[in-house]
Image: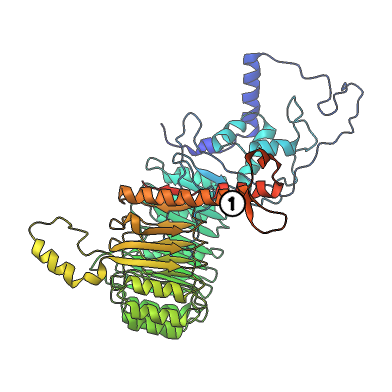
Amino acid sequence: MNHLRPQTHIAPTDGSAAYDASSADAKRGKKRGSYNCGRCGLPKKGHNCNVKTPTSPSHSSLSTFSAVSAAPSSASLVRQPPPNLRRALSFEDAVAGGGFDDDLMDLAGGDAGGAFPESDLDLDLDLDSSGLPMSLLWEVLRRLPPAGLLSAARVSRVWRETTKRLWRAAEELNVRVPARVQVGSVASMLQKCPGIVKLSIKMESDVDSTMLACIAFSCPNLEYMEISTTDTAINRINGDELSRFVSEKKSLKSLKMEGCCNLGRLVLCSSSLSTLWLSDLFSLSKMVFNCPQLREISLEFSRQENDGTDLKTLMEGLGRSCPSLQNIHISSMHLSHAVVLAITAAHLRELRMLSLVLGSEITDASVAAIASSYPNLELLDLSGSGISDSGIGMICNVFSETLTRLLLALCPCVSSSGIQFAMAQLPNLELMDCGMTICDPNSDNPTGDDNSCESQHRSIANGHLTNQKLIIKHSRLKKLSLWGCSGLDALYLNCPQLTDLNLNSCRNLHPERLLLQCPGLENVHASCCQDLLIMAIQNQVHNAYTAMENLLLCKRLPDGSKRVRVPHHLLSNESLEDDNKRRKIERRLCNVVVD
């Protein structure tokens, strides 16, 4: 398949359209038009039609498009699901209906006020022999994929003008660029949509400053930009180029970029930027932020021991130049207690979410510093840290009224007792992640013959890490993750609001020691678990669903003394409320995910 050519995206001129129409008529023969009015059906001779074509709505939108591909000499730009950047700050669910086909591009338009500005296009004219109104034509064409729009533009002058307006009305573009597509093709696509506000690009080839220049030239009103790369692509944008782009884009509010391993140094100055996500950072010699409106920052550094970024200086600069920060996410193997002290010294009064991931040198003293400086945190993520049950106690004492999400994955010093204490002392908790926390130290090599004696001694020394049981009773908990907790052998849950439970790789959890009293469960993840455990989960979930369903088959006696089962021949007389209740319960059927 050939590459996209910019000419295929440019609408032909009037002269070319006339030439195409005349040549087409010569081939198929000239046909006479209809003698009747296309609006009212009366004969046209001596007739003045009073039926007006309805005008187009003042607010229109481009709905989901499929693919830009198209014309015989073009190659398709394919769309991809939104890049799976870490959602450590929001932990929101994936956008509903966001699962795009891997081979398509998505074009979505928002409010396109003034989609039909005044021009030489007469809204009262019949658009074709069927008399299709302009508003109806708009509704039909805006549901076509870009390939269909390119074909529709060659039908007539009116259709070509309408497709032009549709392209200009688009405000959001999500596109995946294959390796074979050149930057010029992307530029021609962006030039057709000058009103783009949100742009998300998935690059399968290397990306450099040329792409930034293309975006800066074609999208003057850009507010949200996201650039992600595949495993085979390299982001060659350096810090000076990115800094220049941000400073020139006065309307840019959100910037998310992957593969930022070649920045070197970064100095960002923007009066409008409020969200910044950068991943794969490595050895930044200088990193300065002068963004007074910055609300959310996420910096993920590469997991390399030779990373020379000075995180302490970085945090001190954030406190001085970004006083409005509300969400901070830092992922680095070089996080330490000194970095935490720099964050606490910044006195960020609006800070509500703090995520410090993979900092093995973060201890209980760091938790004490965080608790004393930021008592209003709603999310705290210390995954991969060295905190213990004592640190959890401090968290419970300070954040008992505000904390709703707590993530303590990969914390080897935390035991099941600490987790149970947190669940009992944090009544507003809705999300809890304890993945790889309750681990069996021998799970990696359960059958090692050469080191059998050493394994036995290690098992005795770490006896508190194995054969642990977890009892959780919570009224508001909605999501619980225990993935990789190989040291857990008994689990008892009484959480009526729990919807998602992750038990992946809980290999030592005994089926007879599992009790799930969670009527609202929707998904249970049980990959890499014993077959007997999976069967036990399915049985308990099914029994809970059956018990809830059976409640609908019972009625109280007139005196209200007790409930009796309703005979089957009377079930047809159930009230409409019971039917609605039955439908709600049927939707709650839990899904056990194994693979």
Count the marks: 1
The residue lying at 64 percent from left, 42 percent from top is 567
Is residue 41 depicted above or below 142 in this figure? Answer: above
Dot 1 surroundings within 10 Å: few (below 14), some, or many (20 or more)? few
Determine the image quadrant of residue 242: bottom left
- Is 553 situated left or right of 66 in this image? right
Indicate the position of residue 379 as horizontal and vertical percent values: 46, 71
Tell me the quarter of the picture where residue 116 sits. top right
Q: Where is residue 126 in the image (x, y as percent from the top left)?
A: 77, 30
511 is higher (above) or lower (below) than 309:
above
In-front residue for pair 24/236? 236
* Residue 470 placement, left or right of 248: left
Q: Residue lying furthest right in this view? A: 46
Determine the residue positioned at 40% across, 42% down.
Answer: 178
For the residue marked with disc 1, what is the amino acid?
Leu
Q: Residue furthest left?
A: 450
Q: In which quarter of the image is residue 37?
A: top right
Please name the residue that numbered disc 1 is placed on.
551
Disc 1 is placed on an element classified as: helix
The spot of residue 110 in percent (x, y) is 63, 51
> Which colour scheme appears in the figure?
rainbow
Residue 233 in view here: no
Q: Is residue 573 above or below residue 298?
A: above
Left or right of 106 in this view: 317? left
Residue 408: in sight, yes or no? Answer: yes
Depth order, front residue of 93/326: 93
User: Which image quarter holds the N terminus?
Assistant: top left
Residue 368, position in %: x, y? 38, 84
